[in-house]
């Protein structure tokens, strides 16, 4: 560990604001990039699932 | 307007704006000869325009930094190890500004050959090392120089 | 060999491949990113000149490296789509564009944040910085160009041509610091000879570069799975895969 205390790791000799801001922005971008396609895929899969169940129920009614 | 057409129009405009911005930026960079700054040798050879805003880059000569006692004004010499040019600057210098380090100064080249800077940026090199390693290197160099 | 290439052109095979790889690639990438960041932020030594602000290097350089590599992947997919008319190549090209744009944005933003304490300015119209901004516009241009057409086949063709034209920018970015006087320093990691960065700082950096490549692969698969789901929503193979 390069820092003696939690406070030292936060301030980083006056550069802490720059360093932590860079890491925070990057984390947000990465999270958005992961969550967006996952949620979109899941909602499309749900639609396909519902459509499939509706059709099956319809076929059962017909027969 | 039909919403679909409107959407298409906006998107087409976005493409046009982005591509023209791209070309604009290329020409902007080219207009400065793509080089960000002039070296002291180029200034000495008269390649840099006088009384127009230019950038001069090089190493700050060791022992050349003079600070005014009552104002922020600083004078220092910049070299590319062939020619030297004097820069005066009235403002706050970046943290990494130091003698023997790289610097890029934006300002006006006067007829006396000195640059009056409006902005001074520190140019650091690609070397990264822990302070202990830097110290060890410095000591090794010092002992190597001594007979 | 040909069988493997053929498999990569088959939507059901690629969908199944993504489905199988994502569950272990996602936690692996997360762990690599967290360990790499902690190493760079807290355990790597302080720089003798810049102090702790240099720690931004552990995201700035990996993001920049992957944004350049990602452009080649996008342009290569574009070439495949133009020459062989493989639908999956279209999808891969479109999947790469937003990821590349995001990584380029991260490189530019972290560069600006790093520039303020070291150079003394957020932004400088330096050859390296300007050519990276052009890379960002190229990625965004590919995304916008695709949306501008109704006919997806023509749209994909136009995007492929644009991405191929843009490849000229990559070597310019890479060599800009050597070709012109710039404020940005030359590369610290060298393929030949010894690197200009101490080993204790180099290893976490290499670790983060590997982690960012893994992240790129993960994001590619997530985006591909998304576009395959939307593209083949009516196909029997997909319905069967989802409903069973």
Image (tube, coloured by chain):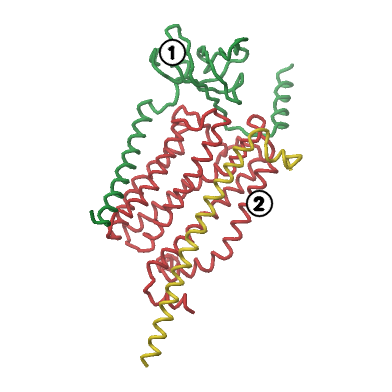
The residue that label 1 is drawn on is B109
Residue farthest to the top, as pictured: B112
| C199 and B91: which is toward the camera | B91
What residue lies at 32% left-to-right and 46% top-to-bottom? B14
Q: Is residue A14 left or right of residue C23?
A: right
In the rendered structure, the residue with mark 2 lies on which chain? Answer: C
Residue C105, above or below C215: above
Residue C60, above or below A34: above
Labels 1, 2: one chain: no
Residue C163, given in percent of the width and then of the height, sits at 36, 49
Supply the letter of whichever chain is yellow: A
Assign a secondary structure to mark 2: helix
The residue that label 2 is drawn on is C35
Residue farthest to the bottom, as pictured: A63
Residue A57, above or below C24: below
Colour of chain C as rendered: red
Marks 1 and 2 sit apart, C-alpha to C-alpha, by 50 Å
Residue farthest to the right, as pictured: A4
Residue B123, given in percent of the width and then of the height, sits at 54, 26
> Which image quarter: residue B72?
top right
What residue lies at 57% left-to-right and 48% top-to-bottom? C209
Residue C60, given in percent of the width and then of the height, sits at 55, 42
Colour of chain B as rendered: green
Residue C195, given in percent of the width and then of the height, sits at 60, 37
For the C terminus of chain B, which image quadrant? top right
- Label 1 CA crowd tier, 10 Å (few <14, some 14–19, many 20+): many
| A6 and C142: which is toward the camera | A6
């Amino acid at each position: 560990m390069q820092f003696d205390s939690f406070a030292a790791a936060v301030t980083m000799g006056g550069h802490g604001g720059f360093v932590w801001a860079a890491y925070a922005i990057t984390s947000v971008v990465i999270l958005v990039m992961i969550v967006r396609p996952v949620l979109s895929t899941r909602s499309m899969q749900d639609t396909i699932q519902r459509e499939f169940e509706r059709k099956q129920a319809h076929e059962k009614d017909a027969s | 307007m039909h919403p679909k057409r409107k959407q298409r129009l906006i998107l087409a405009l976005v493409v046009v704006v982005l591509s023209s911005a791209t070309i604009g930026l290329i020409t902007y960079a080219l207009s400065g000869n793509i080089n960000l700054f002039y070296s002291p040798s180029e200034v000495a050879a008269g390649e840099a325009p006088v009384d127009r805003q230019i950038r001069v880059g090089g190493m700050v000569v060791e022992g050349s930094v003079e600070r005014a006692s009552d104002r922020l004004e600083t004078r220092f010499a910049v070299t590319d190890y062939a020619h030297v040019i004097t820069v005066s600057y009235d403002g706050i210098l970046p943290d990494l500004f130091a003698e023997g380090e790289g610097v890029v100064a934006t300002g006006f080249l006067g007829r006396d050959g000195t640059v009056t800077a409006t902005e001074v940026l520190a140019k650091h090199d690609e070397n990264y090392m822990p302070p202990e390693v830097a110290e060890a290197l410095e000591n090794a160099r010092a002992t190597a120089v001594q007979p | 060999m040909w069988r493997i290439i053929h498999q990569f052109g088959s939507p059901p095979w690629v969908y199944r491949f993504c489905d199988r790889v994502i569950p272990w690639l996602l936690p692996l990438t997360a762990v690599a990113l967290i360990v790499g960041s902690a190493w760079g932020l807290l355990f790597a030594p302080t720089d003798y000149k810049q102090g702790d602000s240099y720690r931004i290097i552990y995201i700035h350089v990996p993001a920049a490296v992957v944004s350049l590599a990602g452009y080649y992947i996008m342009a290569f997919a574009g070439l495949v789509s133009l020459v062989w008319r493989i639908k999956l190549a279209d999808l891969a090209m479109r999947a790469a564009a937003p990821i590349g744009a995001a990584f380029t944005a991260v490189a530019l933003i972290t560069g600006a944040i790093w520039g303020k304490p070291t150079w003394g300015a957020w932004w400088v119209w330096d050859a390296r910085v300007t050519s990276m901004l052009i890379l960002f516009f190229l990625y965004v241009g590919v995304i916008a160009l695709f949306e501008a057409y109704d006919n997806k086949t023509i749209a994909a063709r136009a995007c492929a041509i644009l991405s191929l034209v843009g490849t000229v920018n990559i070597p310019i970015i890479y060599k800009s610091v050597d070709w012109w006087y710039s404020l940005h320093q030359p590369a610290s990691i060298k393929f030949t000879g010894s690197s200009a960065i101490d080993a204790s700082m180099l290893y976490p950096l290499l670790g983060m570069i590997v982690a960012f490549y893994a992240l790129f692969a993960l994001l590619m698969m997530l985006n591909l799975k998304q576009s395959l789901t939307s593209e083949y929503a009516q196909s029997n193979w997909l319905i069967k895969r989802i409903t069973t």
